[in-house]
């Protein structure tokens, strides 16, 4: 295991095992399964390289669960490897948050592996913002979010959300406003789920050297 200097701050990275035909299926319709896999591997490697530079506890949440045992090979450098639970994305995220809180985390950051613009500053500033705000959100251009930070369990943020639609961020924001919780919103970034998404960011690191047009 990689030693962590701040176990009270925990990053939960949601990652799929990089297998052709099983990841980035919408993107594959535009670039083919092999290229979709190459893009996902590049995004995964980028995300992991960023979080490895931070002093926080790093937990990879693995899907499918059967690949937890070999995750250290395709996603090295994490402090722990745990299976994602069953259910929809919201149920899986909430279960991960509960597990992080049970380990003693005081601040938790949920992070996907779809965003080429994520940086060390995105991560560290999120934890800093949680000193002043209840929740931190990083919105995506398509109406979702690429990160969510919180310091208390709040299951309502993960229930009855129209996942994989343009309403995810809006719905989450409405819940925060209804509960009168304070929140900080990062700049919007692009995630890569479709060919249109890829065309918008293919000039950026870590995608520009893949040779995919």
Image: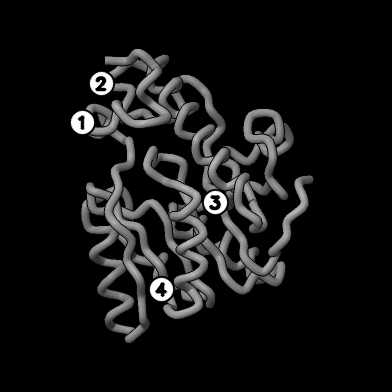
Q: Earlier in the sequence, mark 4 or mark 2?
A: 2
Tags 2 and 1 touching, CB below 8 Å? yes
Q: Secondary structure at mark 2?
A: helix
Q: Earlier in the sequence, mark 2 or mark 1?
A: 2
Gap between marks 2 and 1, in whole Å? Answer: 9 Å
Q: Secondary structure at mark 3?
A: loop
Residue at image mark 4: 156
Residue at image mark 3: 86
Residue at image mark 2: 30
Q: Is residue 212 left or right of residue 95?
A: left
Q: Secondary structure at mark 4?
A: helix
From the viewer's side, name the closer residue of 133 and 18: 133
From the viewer's side, name the closer residue of 7 and 181: 7
What residue appears at the point 47 percent right and 75 percent down from the top-left corner? 154
Q: Earlier in the sequence, mark 4 or mark 1?
A: 4
Query: Which numbered circle lies on residue 16?
Result: none
Question: How many other residues sit within 10 Å of disc 4, few (<14), some (14-19) or many (≥20)?
Answer: some
Q: Is residue 196 left or right of residue 99?
A: left
């Amino acid at each position: 295991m990689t030693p962590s200097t701040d176990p009270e701050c925990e990053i939960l990275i949601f990652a799929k095992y990089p297998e052709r035909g099983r990841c980035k299926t919408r993107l594959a319709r535009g670039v083919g399964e092999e290229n979709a896999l190459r893009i996902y591997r590049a995004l995964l490697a980028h995300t992991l390289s960023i979080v490895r530079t931070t002093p926080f506890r790093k937990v990879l949440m693995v899907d499918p669960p059967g690949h937890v045992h070999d995750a250290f090979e395709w996603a090295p450098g994490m402090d722990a490897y745990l299976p994602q639970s069953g259910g929809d994305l919201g149920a899986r995220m909430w279960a991960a948050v509960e597990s992080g809180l049970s380990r003693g985390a005081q601040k938790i950051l949920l992070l996907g592996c779809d965003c080429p613009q994520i940086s060390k500053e995105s991560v560290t500033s999120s934890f800093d913002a949680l000193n002043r705000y209840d929740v931190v959100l990083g919105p995506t251009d398509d109406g979702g979010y690429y990160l969510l930070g919180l310091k208390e369990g709040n299951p309502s943020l993960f229930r009855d959300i129209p996942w994989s639609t343009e309403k995810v961020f809006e719905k989450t924001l409405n819940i925060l406003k209804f509960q009168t919780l304070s929140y900080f919103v990062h700049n919007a970034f692009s995630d890569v789920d479709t060919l249109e998404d890829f065309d918008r960011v293919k000039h950026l690191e870590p995608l520009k050297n893949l040779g995919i047009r």
